[in-house]
Amino acid sequence: MSASFPPVQVPFATLADALLAAPPQKPFVTMWIDDDDERTIAFGEFTRWSSAQAASFKEQGVRKGDTVILIMPQGVALMAAFAGAMLLGAVPAILAYPTFKVEPAKYRFGLTGVSANLNAKLVVVDASFPVEFLESVSLSDQSKLVRADSSPSSLGNIEVTPTPCGPQDLAFIQHSAGTTGLQKGVALSHGAVLRQLHHLANALKIAPSDRIYSWLPLYHDMGLIACFILPMVYHLHVVMQSPTDWVLQPESMLHLISKYKCTLSWVPNFTLQFLARRVKPEHRKEYDLSSLRALINCSEPVRAESMDSFTSAFSPCGLKPGVLQSSYAMAENVFAVTQSGIDDTSAPRRIWIDSKRYQSERIAVPIDKVSDRAACFVSSGQCLANNEVRIVSEIGDELPEGHVGEILIRSDSMLDGYYNRPDLTSLSLRDGWYWSGDLGFLVDRELYVTGRKKDLIIVGGKNIYPQDVEEIAFGHPAIHDGRAVAFGCFNSDLGTEEIVLVAEVEEISILGDISAIDRAIRGAIVAELGVAPRAIYLKPPRWIVKSTAGKAARAATREKLLAEHPELRIS
Amino acid sequence: MTDSAQELIEYICKEIIRRPTVQIAADTPLVSSGLIDSFSLVDVLSKLEEVTSMRIPAGKVQPKDMDTVSLMLSTAQRVGKPRK
């Protein structure tokens, strides 16, 4: 696939080579819990830890090409285990660590399925990983499960000679969202990852003095690629906290950027809105954001109002014009497909289009921004080098500029395939083009992402399929099977979508007392999907709009609910 | 039930859940049941500091420590420091 693009000279053949070439004294990761509990590890120490971890994996029988599953909390031990596996030429994959919200049966189901597909030689969990989940890891005769050492000292001083690998060898597997139980392992080669980082680093104008701030999980491409692999390859310092630590102290993001003079960060859209709304004006003077070169809005639709709220709240903290930027990224392309103009104070571009024609004709026709029909879209930028985007109709015909259709991507950093899933690979990769399932349009080479073909709901950067929410509702005995519709509703306070569910009860008499049903469904949604729905509406039989095929019609039902509950539109 | 627990319950019902039909007790799961979202915990933590007159280092608290009002109060006792 890369043959159709000009060859790229990358300085290393593999990611392990990049790590081994790092200046040993330079700080690599600062893991911050609070000001009394933070630790910085330099590249040299990190490499020794990774090498000792590799030696331990080798002792367990791991060899080149074997997959290694890592289920550990966010931290340096996890990162060293990941790098250690790569030093052996093995293929690591990070899976999400169980949280207290997850329902054990659901977590077990996902773990069994994903681990069976990965067919790992070794599964590594941390010392605190709950015993009740261990038996749900799928192990073959050839595989083992071990508890990881949380510090390098327990591994001893044994180091390994890195196993020779080349650009074509698989580097790691990162997981892409799918409906529940169908998480897809995206297999990426060293060459693909290094080419992506080369293009991204050029677009971001990366310099050795750059320092990254992140609270993003390492099992997600934005956290893994932008905030671990990019700094590992370009020898940058990354200041990191775990998502659970960040959620209880969101202002710590501003504190850490100020304290460490961070220059780059990536966040989903809701973070901007959340901080703008939650950080009290009297606290803002404590922060200095003047070091930031780029704060990149990625992994949720980019919203102008969220960008404006953040700019207005934090300009007095030294936030420079042009720092807020945007990107369109996906695990299947390693990470970024597009990036808006760094150091360009007018980026990302905005366009005001006629909302009537957008809805009825699926075209983006520019209109005066003061018109009451004007809808504002923010660009996700232009394609990185050796990345191409094409917009196609439902039957696959290429559409002209300004027409809304499915976004197809072609690049020299594309996935090799979904790991052990040739069926899914052939559905998504056709003639070298990846069919993203996202909708958007192009104007002046700028990509505007407008939504998801499959009604995906994106809550705080997390992809939720409405079908999964609806399945949970069907599981309740009071709900008529097949008569539930879930969709996303934008919450301007949070700056993200939230789940709204409407479901028909079996009998009208049930509507007399719905609090127990509401509570049961709500609890099940959190346990299975990890997010709380904003609202659940229970309706009498035959309320939901059906399609001609007799199925619940999601769009029409959504409109009917919004007409009955206009408060959902405003907030 | 202590006054602190009652005050927290009233705050969570009125300011966070905001659904008149929902009532909670000191041991009602909040985040794991979907009654409140993790993002609301920042406000709840702030209220917990107020009602207990403690400074609670957020870095020592995990969302699971905040799942019920009883857990919140025991967390405050465990990691909180009296305000100066």
Image: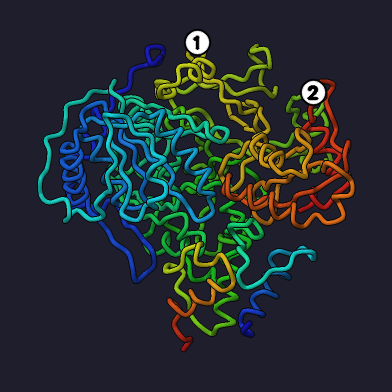
Q: Quadrant of residue A186?
A: top left
Q: Is mark 2 on a helix, strand or loop?
A: helix
Q: Closer to the camera, A567 or A135? A: A135
Task: Report x, y in % for residue A86.
Answer: 25, 35
Amino acid at circle 2? Glu
Q: Closer to the camera, A212 or A511? A: A511
Q: Is mark 1 on a helix, strand or loop?
A: loop
- Determine which residue is flagged by label 1: A431
Residue A234 sits above or below residue A437 on the image: below
How many residues crowd around disc 1 within 10 Å: few (fewer than 14), some, or many (20 or more)?
few
Residue A241 in view here: yes
Q: Quadrant of residue A547?
A: top right
Task: Report x, y in % for residue B65.
Answer: 50, 67
- Determine which residue is flagged by label 2: A361
Amino acid at circle 1? Asp
User: Left or right: B36 with respect to A34?
Assistant: right
Task: Report x, y in % for residue A3.
Answer: 37, 12
Whole-number angstrom distance, CA of label 1 to CA of label 2: 29 Å
Q: Which of marks 1 and 2 is nearer the N terminus?
A: 2
Badge number at residue A255: none
Q: How many labels does the image show?
A: 2
Instruction: Give the residue displayed 68% in from the left and 33% down from the top.
Output: A455
Q: Nearer the viewer, mark 1 or mark 2?
A: 1
Q: In which quarter of the image is residue A167?
A: top left
Residue B43 sits above or below residue A397 on the image: below
Instruction: Give the residue displayed 37% in from the left and 45% down from the top.
Output: A134
**Mark 1 near mark 2, Cβ–Cβ under 8 Å?**
no
